Structure formats: structure tokens, C-alpha cells
Image (cartoon, grey):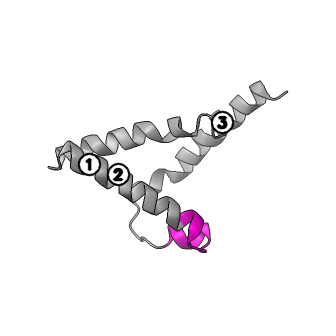
């Protein structure tokens, strides 16, 4: 999974940086914000001692929450399908 894991997120980070520019952030501000937020988010998810459900519940506003199931289905169908192709 780790071999391709960054590809699942790179395009999202790029899109967020572009949105940052559209709302008035400089390129550097967008990059710094994304970088620092991702690092903090990873620490919160994996080093805080909270369950994933508790972490997810910390911020009540989820702008793309209505699409989470669709995104999960894409991950499952594509990634499990790929694994089946390369499974020895």
C-alpha cells in the first residue's frame, strides 16, 4: 500500500493549494498551511491516543462529508482490484 499511497493524496493537496490562491493566499502560504496541517493531522490521528472516530468527530463541519462514501468506494474498488491483479 505504501508504494502508491502518496498518489492518493498529491492531487488533493495540489487542488487545495490552487484553492488557497483563489481565496487570496500566496503560493508559499498555501503550501505551508497544507504541509503543517497534514503533519498535525497525522500526529493527531496516529499519536494522540484517540480512536479514529474520536479524531474525525473533533471538527463538526465536513464540507465534503456527503461524498465520503463515494470516495471510500473508489478507494476500495480501485485498490482492492489492483491488489488482486498483483497478488502472487
Q: Residue at x 52, y 39 (%)?
A: 6
User: So how many labels did they put on this image?
Assistant: 3
Residue 87's place in the image compared with 39, above or below, is above
In this rendering, would 15 be left or right of 47? left
Viewer-proximal residue among 68 and 59:
59
Q: Are marks 2 and 1 in contact (CB under 8 Å)?
A: yes
User: Dot 3, crowdedness within 10 Å: few (<14), some or many (≥20)?
Assistant: some
First of labels 3, 2 by sequence position? 2
User: Dot 2, crowdedness within 10 Å: few (<14), some or many (≥20)?
Assistant: some
Q: Which residues are magenta?
A: 45-57
Does residue 17 show up magenta in the picture?
Answer: no
Viewer-proximal residue among 41 and 69:
41
Q: Nearer the viewer, mark 3 or mark 2?
A: 2
SS for tag 3? helix
The answer for how far apart the CA atoms under marks 2 and 1 are is 6 Å
Image x and y of residue 45, in percent: 55, 64
Image x and y of residue 82, in percent: 69, 29
SS for tag 1? helix
User: Dot 1, crowdedness within 10 Å: few (<14), some or many (≥20)?
Assistant: many
SS for tag 2? helix
Image x and y of residue 57, in percent: 50, 72
Question: In the rendered image, which residue does mark 2 sit on?
Answer: 34
Q: Nearer the viewer, mark 1 or mark 3?
A: 1
Question: In the rendered image, which residue does mark 3 sit on?
Answer: 79
Question: In the rendered image, which residue does mark 1 sit on?
Answer: 30
Residue 18's place in the image compared with 38, above or below, is above
Q: Main secondary structure of the magenta part?
A: helix
Image x and y of residue 79, in percent: 66, 36
Q: Residue at x 71, y 37 (%)?
A: 80
Residue 36's place in the image compared with 27, above or below, is below
First of labels 1, 3 by sequence position? 1
Amino acid at each position: 500500500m505504501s508504494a502508491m499511497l502518496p498518489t492518493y493524496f498529491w492531487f488533493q493537496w495540489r487542488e487545495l493549494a490552487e484553492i488557497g490562491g483563489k481565496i487570496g493566499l500566496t503560493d508559499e502560504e498555501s503550501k505551508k498551511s497544507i504541509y503543517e496541517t497534514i503533519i498535525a493531522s497525522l500526529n493527531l490521528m496516529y499519536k494522540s491516543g484517540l480512536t479514529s472516530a474520536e479524531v474525525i468527530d473533533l471538527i463538526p463541519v465536513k464540507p465534503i462529508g456527503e461524498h465520503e462514501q463515494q470516495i471510500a468506494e473508489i478507494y476500495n474498488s480501485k485498490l482492492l482490484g489492483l491488489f488482486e491483479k498483483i497478488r502472487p
